[in-house]
Each structure stands twice: as C-alpha cells, then as structure tokens.
Amino acid sequence: MSPRSLPGRRTVLHGSLAASAALALPAAAGSAPAFARSGRPEARWGVQTGDVTHDSGLVWVRSDRPARMIVETSATESFRRPRSWHGPLLGPGTDFTGTTRLRGLPAGEQIHYRVRLADPDDPRRSGEPVTGTFRTVSARRREGVRFVWSGDLAGQGWGIDPGFGGYRIFEAMARTDPDFFLFSGDTVYADGPLPATAALPDGGVWRNITTEEKSKVAETLAEFRGNFRYNLLDEHFRRFNARVPSIVQWDDHEVRNNWYPGQRIADTDGRYTEKSVDVLAARARRAFGEYFPMSTPRPGEREGRVHRVLRQGPLLDVFVLDMRTYRNANSPGDQTVDPQGILGREQLEWLERELARSRAVWKVIAADMPLGLIVSDTGEGARHVEAVAQGDPGAPLGRELQIAELLRFIKHRRITGTVWLTADVHHTSAQHYQPARAAFDDFEPFWEFVSGPLNAGAFPASALDGTFGPERVFVKAPDTANVSPAGGHQYFGEVDIDGGSGELTVRLREQDGTVLYTKRLRPGLVGQ
C-alpha cells in the first residue's frame, strides 16, 4: 500500500461516524415524510463530501425541515478550536438538501467535520451534529494515492434487502482506506421500480425495502429526488459517505435506459406519461445535482455540466466524462462521418485540451461506458449501438471515429499515463488495446478496466469489437442474465499509485474485497 505520513482513515475512531450513519430514518414504506413543525432539525440521511482538492472540499447534507446548514472543521475528532462555515438555507427548492464549499484547507491533512442544522428562526435551536472525515489532496508525491471505483447501484429490481445485509459492498470498499470513490454512473435506477419481493433461484426470497417513489418509473422531479433518497436508506452507504469523498458521474439510468438527447418515448410505452426524454433528463439532472456534492459550472460553462477534471496531486488527474448529454441518437453506428459522436465536439475539445495541459504522472479517464465492448440498444426495435463499439471489427465507423480522433491526439501529443476506467456492463474485466491487433493503428497501447455492479443484476460478458485491438486478459461474469446480489458477481476496482516508484496498481475485487486480478503499470512507459 502507498505510504501515508499521517494516520489513514482506518486509524480514525469509528464510533461517532457509525452513530452518525445509524441515525433513525423516516419510515421507508411511503414517500418523503411530512416535514415536522416542532422539535429540532435533523440530518437523517447522513453527510457526504465530494470533489475534494488540495485546499477545498464540498460537504453535503439533507434536513428534515427548513434549516440553516452550519459546518465546523477541525484537525482532531475532539473538535478543539473548530473553524465554522455558514452554509445555505435548506428549503423545498432543493428538497431540503444543501452543499457548502470549504476553502483554505491544509493540503494532505485529515479533516474532521460536523454538520449542524439550525432553526432559521431561532439559531439557538439546532439538531444533533452529524460527523464525517476526509483527507485533502496531498501536494507531496511521496504520500501516494489510492481510490476505488464502481457503478450500477440497485438496478434490475434488486434494492435494499436487510436480510441480505443491504449494500454491504460499501463496507469492503471502505476497508481499502481509499482517498476517494469514483462513482462511475448509474448511481440510481430511476427507470427501475422495485417490487416488494423477488424469487431467487435457490427458492429463497429477496425482500426489498420499498418507497412510493420506487413503485414506478420516475417522471416528476419529486420522483427523481425519491430515487436518490432511496439509496441513503442503507446504513452501509451512509457510513461510507461519511468517511470517503466521492467523484460522481452519471449515465443512463439516472434518467431512463439508453436515453439520448431529443429522444421521444413511444406511445406504446404506458409506463411514461411524459414522452420527452429531454424533460425527464432536466428533472433528473436537477435531482442529481441536489443529492451529490459536485462542483458547479464556472462562469461561461454550460449549466448542468458534469464533465470536469479533478486534480489529485502530482501523481493523478481524473478526467470525468459525460457520455450521455452530448451524444447523437443511437443508431446502427455505420456512419463514415460522425463529428458529434458520443462526447460531442465541445467536450472532446475540452478533453484534448486538458489532457495536453496535465502534468500528472497518471491520467485516469473516467468513462461511463466502455470503448471496445459491444453494448447494444434493441429497445427501439432495431439493433442500435448504445456505447461506442458497433460490432464491425474493421475501420472506425460511427462513434468509433471520435474515439479514434482522441486516441490519435494522445499519441501525437505524446501524452503518457492514460488509463480508462468504467462500469456499466455489470461484470468485471481488463482489456489491453494494442495497435498491432487493430484495424485502426494510429494510437499507443493502453488499458481499460471495468468493474461493477454495486448492488444490481449481474450479466454475462459483452463481446469485443476489434477496431482498436482489445484483448481481454481477465473477465469474471455470470453465465446467465440478471443474477441477483445474493448470487454474487458484485464488483469494485481499486487503484493504488505508489508515491516512491510512481507505479499504478489496479486490483479488481469481489463484493467481500477478495482480489480477483492485479495489474501493475509502470510510469512513463508505452505499450505495457
């Protein structure tokens, strides 16, 4: 493991964090509760941090009624000589959620924080503080970087089953002592209602916690909000959020399976009364921004922007892609000209510019969909391409043209240390892309690692498209579709960058933390 000059999170006493995460939650059988008109505000959904830098971080909370958000930070759990931050007034306009940016923090330090919710009419009346901790990005290379990634939470009808242990995979991720969690999309399944029970192959029964908002597909803003709130009913998830900052991106299920801008839902799909996907996406994006602590667009940037770069010290930059908002319509993917592609021209130019500017040893490209794995969209009655690869192993076509342009740019600008991480396909694998095997060969070799789901149905491995010469050197996936979390095949990945050698080690792990596959990459090398 990477050395740490300060105690890691594993040395932090867990009592206060466990107590924070175990706060009594609203009854889960119905919709969000009526907000109390007496008593003190409570933060029953825990706390989160996100988009942490060397001197800043975002702290999130949700109140059970109107309240003023107040954050205190300290170098120790005793909160001696705390520093106070007055956050926003939480109200119905944001579903009583709020985020406060902490600035001027010391680099590479463990930050203890607590959030207090005060009555806006009487600041002396405040609820019990909820505590958390995170570590700011170190400016010193020798301390190394470690993080975990995965995606696809609570899909295909598999929600929170207390008898199974809930989202217990988050406990295994926490045990790796990560600096942050890269949440690689499908953070909710807004299009996936949860039944009360589901039969298991062994004769057992999966029993979901259910809520009103999870009883149908999400269409209204309140229903999208309820989908994000649902996951916070799980104590493992809340406890993890209080200990590990997140870098979050979205994919399709935050809105609807395989969506793209401008799409119209067929009149024959009786689940939806709202037929405009753009309307649904706007509501989903608003709820997504309310329920995760993520950086807001800078002046001049597009409203609702998800793509961004998070600089994690001398060793690592994380480039968060949005492969959903700017894409063209799903199609067979056989176009010989495709300037819009899956990223859109604006985002592609941003990515190329930021990659060229990066001085980090490693450049992790966080993609919400894989490159060479074939992901099809058959929902509209024809075989359309949902991701990049379109099944023809020859020269690039369709969205592959844009990826070819990007790979060529990386080669000719001599950008080293690019590694692609993704989730989406509900299994885990490692692919090495090699121009000697490819129909398109104007690029340098690189690796792509896949991991997920977190608590969703697992699926057989996707077929490979040979255009960019992928070789699957490891895969673990079920033989049948939609295997429940009780049947295994739940995965996350770990990346550990050593501060001394600069080597990057990827470990693909199972639900309990067991290491399935390890790959060590040396810095500055091409074709490894």
Image (cartoon, grey):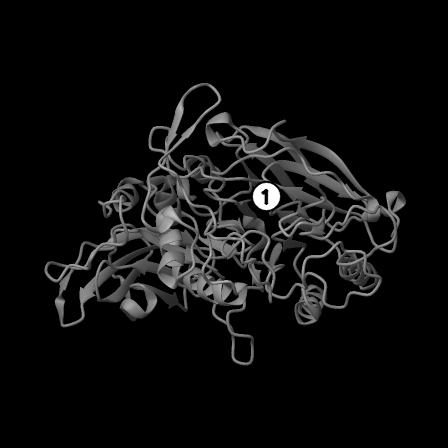
Q: Where is residue 333 in the image (x, y as percent from the top left)?
A: 76, 56
Q: Looking at the picture, which amino acid does disc 1 mark?
A: Val
Q: Work out which residue is located at the far bottom of the displayed protein and give it.
A: 300
Residue at point 55%, 54% (across, down)? 252
Residue to which mark 1 is pinned:
495
Q: Work out which residue is located at the far front of the displayed protein and give it.
A: 268
Asked if one can make out residue 242 in the rendered structure from this viewpoint, the answer is no
Q: Give the mark count.
A: 1
Q: Position of residue 367 (x, y in %)?
A: 63, 53
Is disc 1 surrounded by few (<14), some (14 to 19) or many (20+) residues within 10 Å?
Answer: many
Q: Where, quadrant-wise, is the N terminus in this rendering?
A: top right
Q: Which type of secondary structure does the marked residue at label 1 adopt? A: strand
Vertical placement of residue 372 versus 53, above or below? above
In the picture, residue 343 is in which quadrant? bottom right
- Which residue occupies the foreground of this view, 128 or 286? 286
Residue at point 89%, 44% (across, down)? 436
Asked if one can make out residue 49 in the rendered structure from this viewpoint, the answer is yes
Q: Where, quadrant-wise, is the C terminus in this rendering?
A: top right
